[in-house]
Amino acid sequence: MGIVTVLWEKWVEFRRDFIKITFAAMLSPIMYLIIFGIGVRVDSNGEPYLNFLIPGLVAMATMTGSFSATAQNMSIQRLYEKALDQVMISPTPLWQFILGQVIGGSLRGLYAGAMILLITLPLNRGLIFTPLSFFIMFLNGAVFSTIALFLSFLAKSYTDAPRYTTYIIMPMSFLCNTFFSTDRLPEGLRQFVYILPLSQACSMIRAVARGEKIRVTGIIILMLYLLVFGLLSISFIYKKKNL
């Protein structure tokens, strides 16, 4: 019941701010598409660059959509509205509250990714997007929702949320296999970037789009991120309740 309540809150918020949410989800990817995909006409490994770029933009949209939806809302609720304190004294199981936040954030990321697929449909040159693609998009959104949830618990003020976006989301947006392959990165940095969640999501969505098999290790890495940050979030909120 707690999960449904949280998701209903997210749904009400989505309906209320539908235009703003949709515009925010589409603006940056459209600009990247114009600048890199249309303005820079190059090939990538013998294929049109747009075929490389579009899956990366889809993965990036799921990351930014889920992270921003969770981090900003949770920071406001915890620091100013004190909604988290009310949840902790309510009969709602805290794990249901956290799971609802993660699912809600991942759905927001999935919506952002779907919007990118919609606007790039006229530019699609044989790319394939299957239910597996949407599962990877949802899983990637869930990972960044849990990361955002954990960081929002650590935030000391509302201004910390934009800082997390600058320090974490922006570097990953440009380095993690979105605009260029991680194979071009220097030794050491390449291995580090490779194990980041967005790199795995980009690789798997791109593999599905090309009709290739995905690496199971990519799913495992995303699940490990989801498990670690999910447990950290649960640990934080239960520790706070028992103070």
Image (cartoon, helix red, strand yellow):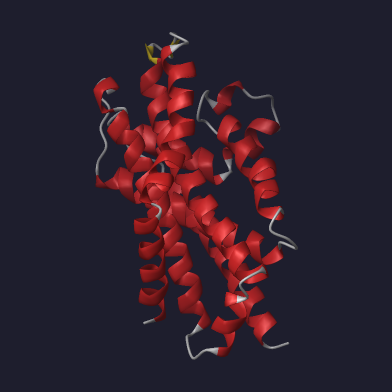
| Residue depicted at x 49% and y 17% | 35
Residue 136 x %, y %: 38, 48
Outermost residue on the top side: it is: 41
Left or right side of 185 for 46: left
Residue 148 x %, y %: 58, 57
Q: Is residue 14 above or below residue 185?
A: below
Left or right side of 143 for 10: left
Decide if residue 29 is in sight here. yes
Q: Camera-side residue: 240 or 225?
A: 240
| Residue depicted at x 69% and y 27% | 187
| Quadrant in which the N terminus is drawn | bottom left
Q: Camera-side residue: 65 or 49?
A: 65
Q: Is residue 139 above or below residue 200?
A: below
Residue 137 x %, y %: 39, 47
Residue 11 x %, y %: 36, 63
Left or right side of 158 for 50: left
Q: Is residue 47 above or below residue 142?
A: above
